[in-house]
Every structure is written in structure tokens, then in C-alpha cells.
Image (tube, rainbow, N blue to C red):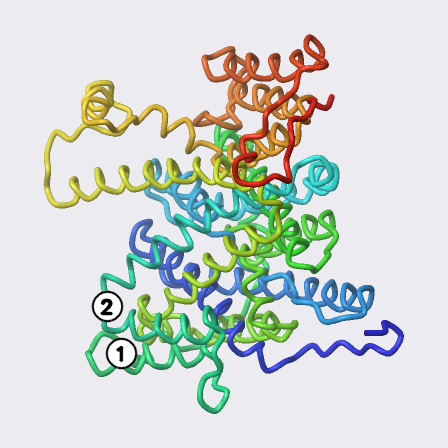
Amino acid sequence: MNASGYSYRLFDRNDYSAFWALFTDNLINLIVLSGICQFVFQMPAEIVYGRIVPGAAVAILAGIAVYVMLAKRAAAQAGRDVTALPYGISTPVMFVYLFGVIGPIYWSTNDALLAWQVGIGAGFIGGIVAALGAVVGPALKRVTPRAGMLGTLCGIALVFIGTVPLAEIFENPVVGFASLTIILWGLVGRFRLPWNIPAGLLALGIGVLLALILGEASISVEGLGFYPPMPYFGDLVAGIQHLMNNPELFLVLVPVQIYNFIETMNNVESAEAAGDHYPVAVCQVTDGAGTMIGALFGSPFPTTAYIGHPAYKRMGAHTGYIIGVGVIVPLAAFLGLLAFLANLIPVAAAAPVLVFVALSLISNTAHSVKPAHMGAVAFAMLPHVSDFLIIKWGALIGALGAVGAENLAQLGDPELTAALLQQGAHFNGHLALSQGAILTGLIWGAIVASLIDGEFTTSAGFAFAAAAMSSVGIIHGASLQVPSLDGITIGYLISGAFFFLYPRVFPSGAMIDTFAEESTEFAPRTPAE
């Protein structure tokens, strides 16, 4: 296609299915955060639906406006159709803010208003940290192997975007299987549905209809009203002041925002692997700015470019799907429709769309890295399994307490840790892997990919960087700390030293490629420096 005669259409019929997928993803996040704030932290509905939800909608709208412009520019530069980056509230970071910032303030003061103020203060400062990622993001993207960046995303996709929704489908199989069948037929199998109905819309519609028939969904107008977004300067300043007076909260805030800008970098790389090129620095600034805008308007929760661009591109989406989300989500937030939609749409009907996003991301990664690097991708996924286990073990302890079990040991208790080890559950190891899992996966994926290519010096650099981050608690630690030389840090130093010295001590040493039996394409190589 000639770029000079090319005209990019913002809207395509394929945007309909993509819209329902992205809308469902954002809707679930909004439902979860509003439910936790209202029923766990006892925030009044005026704060939850009058401030937090409208503020989140403003942040989503602001970010989508930028990503629409970036898509138009990318299409003009490439002279062909592109798919806009999906955008919304970062799911993993949302939970960290809920239970690492807002929760501790509420539990220690029993003051829901103060907890919300500190939350938006943390969100605003966190947005600054995320935007500063633009300073190092392009350089990190240049030196980090694609297998590391995409592999750690595949880990998130496998356990959180794929496995959890699949379990929700099996908890409600009548509704879930009906929606899943349509998703597999129309989006995974890519068969045309009758009358060209978008698969995402049909799957959601069938799921909602079955849920209504079975009495598992309802139509309720409770909570409808007008909730206009308002800036909360005074509350924002109060929250920031409280943070300054309690700097230990920054030990939670800074690492998770480093995670956030790394996630953005990885998602931009995922889009590039699918064929669409976006400037990583601009995306990181956009995510940080969107988070700050949301905080000013009442939302503590960071926004980010979403995982899943390859899935939306595979659907054939252009930009209309994020425009639709940028219109419908704010309308739902400002008119109080969130509770209405939560009652109407069962989780099992929406979950198959998320399963498809996970499948697409993993399969696209397999096509966008060279076959020899799939071992690195697999390694990068492993820390997220540990992260999943730690979260679920914590949930199990909480559930036992909720049903009245007494004298429960908490996770981390030495006796419980020893008992778990006797049962083959390596709590300490999984805990270390879970802390900073996205960075750990990226680093080990990069180490393994570089080793496969014989780039020993690059592997050494990532190992030494991991040692530095481990020593201060960015990875493998519960919080930031004074640099210390623990076992994991020493382990990284040993690995880095070996990777660095080997090609210098044995410069002519040959490596036998482990894939040689499967392909004659590879031959013994000399390690590159």
C-alpha cells in the first residue's frame, strides 16, 4: 500500500468485538475496586461512586485520547492499518494500591476518608515515578531481549488473565461454557458467525441472557444518578502531606511504579512484535500523566497501556474499540451505571474474552521470537506462577479466618513455613520469586536469551543489575531497604561473575547448542563478548 494514498479509518467493523473485550476488562477492574473500597474499607458510596469511579473514568478518557493520536500517527508513518494500544487501570498495581497503601491506612486509623486521600496522594506521586520511566525506558528497550520482555508478560497472561478467568468459567459452566464456545469459534478459530455478528458481543449477550433466565443476573436501577467528575485539590494535598509524614509508604509505592513503567515498556514491545510501532517514552509519560490526572479527580489507581494488543490486532481492530471504551466507561461512571452493569453481566460471561487475550498474547510471542528463545520465554514466565501461589495461599489463610478458624498461623510464620516445606511447598522460594515477579521474569528471560545467543557480557550485565536491585529490595524483597548482601544477591553476583569471566578466560571455548538435535541450523559457537 502506498503511504501517500493511504487513509486510515479510525473505525472498522472488527472494532465491535475488540470493544467488548477491552470494555469488559476495564469494567471488571472498576467493579472489583469499587466493591473492595465500599465493603472492605467501608468507604461511603459518595466517595466510591461519586469520586473514585468518575476519577478513574477521567484518567481512562485522557489516556485514550493520546493513544488515539499515537495510532493515527503510527498509521500515517507506516502507510497501513494499525491497532491502537489498549489502555485502562493496571490490574496488578490496583491490588497493590488497595492492600499496600489504602488498606493499611484504613486498618490503622479506621478513617475511610483519610485512606482515600492518601490513596490519591500516592497515585499522584506514583504517576510522577511512572512518567520518569520515559528517561530510561527507551534505553532499557534497546538492550533487553524481546524474549525477556514478552516472556514476563506471558507469565502474567498465563496465570492471571487466563487461569483465573478460566476457573471462573468452570464455577458457572452453563453461562461460562456458552460464552466460551462463541469466543473459541469466532475469535480463536476465526470462523465467521451468522450475519457477521461480532463474536465478543454475541458471547456476552448469550451469557447475559442465560444468566437472566437462570436468575444469576438482574436488572436494577439502584444507584443511577449523576456523578460529575470534580478536581479534589485539597484532598490531594492532604494525602501527599500524610505520605510525607509517613515515608515508609514510599517503600510500597516506588517499586510498584517501577513495575508499572516496565509493564508499559513490555506492552509496547508486544505491539511492536505484532507489527505496530509506538514510542515507548511517550507511552510511559502518557501512563504517568493519566495516573496523575485520575488522582486529581479522585482515583488512586494507576493507568497503563494494557497487555493484549496482539489479541486486538488479531481481531482486526483499528482505533474505534478504544474510542468506544473512552466514551462508554465515562458515561457509565458519570451516570451511576456501574452497579447496573455489575448486576447485569455475570463474571462467567465476560471471562472467556480474557482467556482469549491470554491465548493470543502467548501464541503471538511464540511467533515473534526465534525458536531458540522459547526457552527464555518459558523461564520468564515461571516467577509469575510463584506470585500466583503466594496470593492464593494468602487468600486461603484469610478464608480460614473468615469461617471462624482460630489460632491460625500467618504466612511467613517459621513453624508454618517448616510444615509447608515438609509437604513439598517451598514457601520462602516462592515468596522471593513473587516479590517483583515482572522484573524477575524480565531479567531471567534476558539472561537466558543472551546466553542462548552467546552474549555472555549481556547476561552478566543483567545478573549484576539483578544483584543491585535485590540488595535494596526492588526484587525479592517485601520493601525497599538499605543495601544488604543476602544469599540471593550473592547468587546473582556469582552468576554475573561467571558470565563475565568465562569468555575472557576461555575465549576459544565452543558451546554445543542444546537445540542441535532438533535442528541442523545450529552449530557449535564461540561465546561472544
- Cα distance in 3D space between marks 1 and 2: 18 Å
Q: Name which residue type carries label 1.
A: Ser
Image position, residue 132 (x, y; %):
69, 40
Image position, residue 472 (x, y; %):
54, 20
Q: Is residue 446 above or below residue 482?
A: below
Q: Residue at x 58, y 40 (%)?
A: 373
Quarter of the image that includes the C terminus: top right
Mark linked to residue 54: none
Label 2 SS: helix
Q: What residue did someone put label 1 on?
A: 218
Image position, residue 34 (x, y; %):
39, 59
Label 1 SS: loop
Q: Residue at x 56, y 51 (%)?
A: 365
Q: Name which residue type carries label 2.
A: Pro
Q: Is residue 178 visible?
A: yes
Answer few, some or many: residues within 10 Å of disc 2's Cα (few below 14, many 20 plus, some between 14 and 19): some
Would you say 279 lies left or right of 121 here?
A: right
